Image: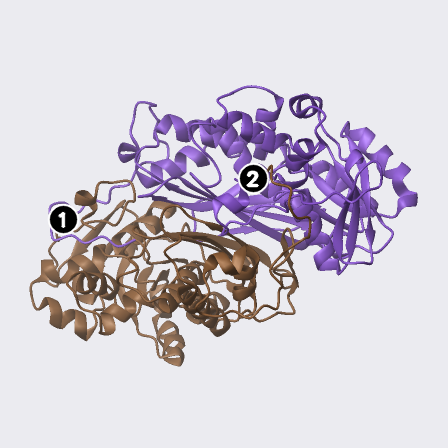
Chain colours: A purple, B brown
Amino acid sequence: MLMYTDDLKSLCWTKVPMTQNINTGQGLRDLGEFGLIDLIARKSRPSSAVTIGIGDDAAAFHLHPNCLALATTDTLLEGVHFDLSFCDPARLGRKSLAVNLSDIAAMGGKPLSFLLSLAIPETISLDFLEAFSSGLLEIADEFGVSLIGGDTCASRGGLVIGITLFGGQEVQKLTRRCTARPGESIFVTGYLGDSALGLKLLREGHRDGDAISRHLDPAPRVHEGLALAESGLPCAMIDISDGLLSDLGHITGKSSMGARLYLDKIPLSREYSEYFGSDDHERYSLALGGGEDYELLFTAPTYRKCEIEKLFRNFGTPVSEIGEITAVPGILVLSAEGETVQGIATGYDHFLPRDVNRS
Amino acid sequence: MLMYTDDLKSLCWTKVPMTQNINTGQGLRDLGEFGLIDLIARKSRPSSAVTIGIGDDAAAFHLHPNCLALATTDTLLEGVHFDLSFCDPARLGRKSLAVNLSDIAAMGGKPLSFLLSLAIPETISLDFLEAFSSGLLEIADEFGVSLIGGDTCASRGGLVIGITLFGGQEVQKLTRRCTARPGESIFVTGYLGDSALGLKLLREGHRDGDAISRHLDPAPRVHEGLALAESGLPCAMIDISDGLLSDLGHITGKSSMGARLYLDKIPLSREYSEYFGSDDHERYSLALGGGEDYELLFTAPTYRKCEIEKLFRNFGTPVSEIGEITAVPGILVLSAEGETVQGIATGYDHFLPRDVNRS
């Protein structure tokens, strides 16, 4: 970024020492850009796979031998993707990486390292940044990924968090969206709709509970995605970020297929079921059309169901068969009575008006 | 992103077809998120090195054999990094990638592919996005890099452009910041200060001229950086983004060295020299403290100067020897008379007040 000065008072090269102690009362202006990078870098663990980490023009890292490089990026904007009155900074840090981990999981990849971009408004305190980076690097440690670089700047709008995550996998083990075939069963991990319910509860003024935790601190299915890919079980796979119908639509669209879904097989948590009671339309709208579940949605031959269930028992992660892939385009949702269910919304589009998205 | 609906009117899976024609009068709301991705994707050329490009959870790509993966990211914010009243969208697209290309050049790497994140306010038109993506993918073609993925969302603040660029290089050819040694000469490509002068002229109401072009459409020294790395000439290298003194400070700081700079050897363009006249303080403040030159700054043994000059003659790119690395920490700037020049500002820090940065 450009600066312009006509004030020639002192020549000394001044930068924030990389070993400076951070006082929590200190402001971002006292800390400076390099101090902030240091604040985050000091929490980050070195990795033998990373040849050059934070502090050069670019990061450099080895991939495992015979490995394809995988890369995914997600930018989270204050007021669009998160509301600072709802979320504490540590869980925001965790979620920022989790949404990217979920993308690598959906490819059946092993996550390796990531870059962090932060645009920070003046209203953000050092305490906030300490907690944010602690949460971020805590989940990074949990999944064995290293922070290897990034950039920081001041924002004149809200907080902007950009993460690019790298992973690796052998080409023949990658799980794509475009490879579903007719007759395959459709499986989903965990429970659906809890994250959307959590957001609804937050907006109603609640601050605790399982659904709210699922929304603020989702668990990416990294180990499950990798184990599925290693076993060669899935034919197509995606993570549910936009909503079940929308993301299943990505699989059927990319595969030039259709799908049948059985409403009574959609996995719902106890909290979710209790909240919505027995009205099916109320009950299933968030589970099918809500987003940010970060569960894995995949197709596999029906005869391999037992293998799949066994694999998931090892993780203690629920898995449900919820429908099948068809050769006829479009997604049919069927009730327990076998009737077509009309009119369930299809997911979030960032450029549609709020009243269409019902965000 | 979450959506919430209790309106169960229609079930059909609707998405914008990937082959849709874009009418320039069309709004972003008509186009939708997937239409926008398609608008950009259609301009992008496929590459044999990219196994999975746009349209899956993550991109997957091969590196050249025996190659380290390089990665760099830069986020450009409206109102911080660019002013839409100064820059046309095509040059903004070019510059967004150029600043990342310059980072890979500084590592001596070959740029390969990139991810694009866009957060777009309602005020941005489709015409703007067409021109932006044309400029972006034009410079991508010039340097042989492929767009392989990214994300898009609506912004409630200004336009946010995030790019993560990947490259590759053999580990022994990488050019680092931390490897300068005493006695090495310091070289810089091109002319310094033009970009900062261009910004000053834009703020004064001018809209044309070489300095303004240098600011709005900088030329990353990718071929030069790669050729230097392949020849094994540089001992340490960085690109000048924050300003000569600031970026030289990164080399001396990371290498635990100091430097002497000779003011009369700093390369200045004719437009720059004519603008500032003979007052040395005025004349050199932007060349030493301004930023966004995106020239290469490197150190090399003095006896290899002829080889370096020969290499740069092939590119038609000026190269100047401007000083030397010393064992004593700190950067000394010396006048033509050999006197120490006091008080030239050291570069831009995003978290310092504007009056300190004089931005």
Q: Is residue B248 left or right of residue A358?
A: left
For image coordinates 82% across by 29% down, the residue present is A313
The residue where tag 2 is placed is B2
Q: Is residue A239 left or right of residue B224?
A: right
For image coordinates 29% across by 26% down, the residue present is A26
Instruction: Answer whether labels 1 and 2 touch (C-beta < 8 Å).
Output: no
Q: Residues within 10 Å of mark 1 (few under 14, many from 20)?
A: some
For image coordinates 64% across by 32% down, the residue present is A219
Classify the position of the N terminus of chain B by image quarter: top right
Label located before the other in sequence (1 or 2): 2
Q: Are the residues under badges 1 and 2 in a single subunit?
A: yes
Check the residue under mark 2 and report the chain it is in: B
For badge 2, the amino acid type reads Leu
Mark 1 or 2, which is nearer the eye?
Answer: 2
The residue where tag 1 is placed is B343
Which picture quadrant has residue A181? bottom right
The answer, for residue B169, to whether it is visible in the render is no
Q: Residues within 10 Å of mark 2 (few under 14, many from 20)?
A: many
For badge 1, the amino acid type reads Gly
* Closer to the camera in the image, A177 or A333: A333
Q: Is residue A207 above or below residue B34?
A: above
* Closer to the camera in the image, B308 or A331: A331
